[in-house]
Each structure stands twice: as C-alpha cells, then as structure tokens.
Image: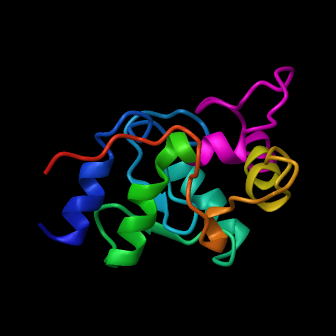
Amino acid sequence: MSVAKKVEALLKLPGNNFCADCGCPKPNWASASLGVFVCFNCSGLHRGLGTHLSFVRSVNMDNWTEKQYKKMKEWGNNNANAYFEAKLPSSLKKPTQDSSVNEMNRFIRDKYEMNAYVPDNGEGDPRRGAKPGNRARAPEPTP
C-alpha cells in the first residue's frame, strides 16, 4: 500500500474523522509535524503559524514520506489533543466550524504557538520527536 493510501486510511480512525481544532467532519488536510488532521479552513490558519510549528499537507494531493505517515499514525487527533489541550480550561469553549476566523486563529495560536494548554512540564511535544506516552493511543489501522 502506498504511503498516501496509508495516510488516507488513518482518517477512518476515531477522532481523525473530525478536525482536531474545530470539529468539522471529514478533514482532508493535516499537520505532519503535529500529527493532526484538520479541515481546509484550519489548515490555512496552521500555515500561518509557519512550517517550524505546523507543516501542513493535503491528505490527497501532496506526497507523504514514511516518516510523516509514522508521525500521523503515532499521534492522530485524539493523542495530540490529549497533549495540546491537557490544560484547556473548562470555562473556555472550544471553537467550532461556525466560529469566526479571528476566534479560530486565536485558539490555534494559543494551542500550538503559545502552548497555553499543554502540561506544565511541556514534555511530550510531537514537534520535538516525543511519543504519545501514557496517554490513550488511537487504535491501529486495519490494512
């Protein structure tokens, strides 16, 4: 199976079938450096973060490396959100696909650029090669 088909298969796993940031169904973009699947609108905001924070790829149109696939398989939306939203205050309502661009941009910048909701020690960042660790892992895709 090609790497692109393996990445596409990851979209069928629980959590990956919704945008990691706004919850929009059927995302078709991804941040290969963060290990998350995102919708078209959020992908543009991720691009605005810069490739040093979020390296955005189209699930269907871009070429994927085996290393990028492994990051997506290892993390996925559930594991990445468990890390990047670990300290998300219950009083803060997570934006939805109907939120304004400004609201989404602020949330995405706080989440990935400012690391506002990561655990206190900040260890476990997928951009620095960390693995999901003891957090709940997404199930393995079936070939």
Tell me how many marks there are: 0
Vertical position of residue 133 compared to residue 136: above or below: below
Q: Position of residue 77 (x, y in %)?
A: 51, 44
Colour treatment of the image: rainbow
Quadrant position of the N terminus in the picture: bottom left
Residue at position x 19%, y 61% in the image: 5
Vertical position of residue 124 compared to residue 120: above or below: below
- In the image as oriented, which residue stretches furthest toward the top? 91
Q: Position of residue 105 (x, y in %)?
A: 75, 50
* Residue 141 appears anywhere in the view: yes
Q: Is residue 3 left or right of residue 113?
A: left
* Residue 64 appears anywhere in the view: no
Residue at position x 66%, y 58% in the image: 45
User: Who is closer to the viewer here, 45 or 127?
Assistant: 127
Q: Is residue 8 left or right of residue 143?
A: right
Query: Would you say residue 103 sits in the magenta stretch?
Result: yes
Residue at position x 59%, y 60% in the image: 44
Q: Position of residue 108 (x, y in %)?
A: 73, 50
Query: Would you say residue 141 sits in the magenta stretch?
Result: no
Vertical position of residue 32 compared to residue 111: above or below: below
Residue at position x 62%, y 29% in the image: 98
Residue 23 figure quarter: top right
Residue 126 figure quarter: bottom right
Q: Is residue 59 left or right of residue 6?
A: right
Vertical position of residue 99 compared to residue 41: above or below: above
Look at the image and give the residue range highlighted in magenta.
80-106
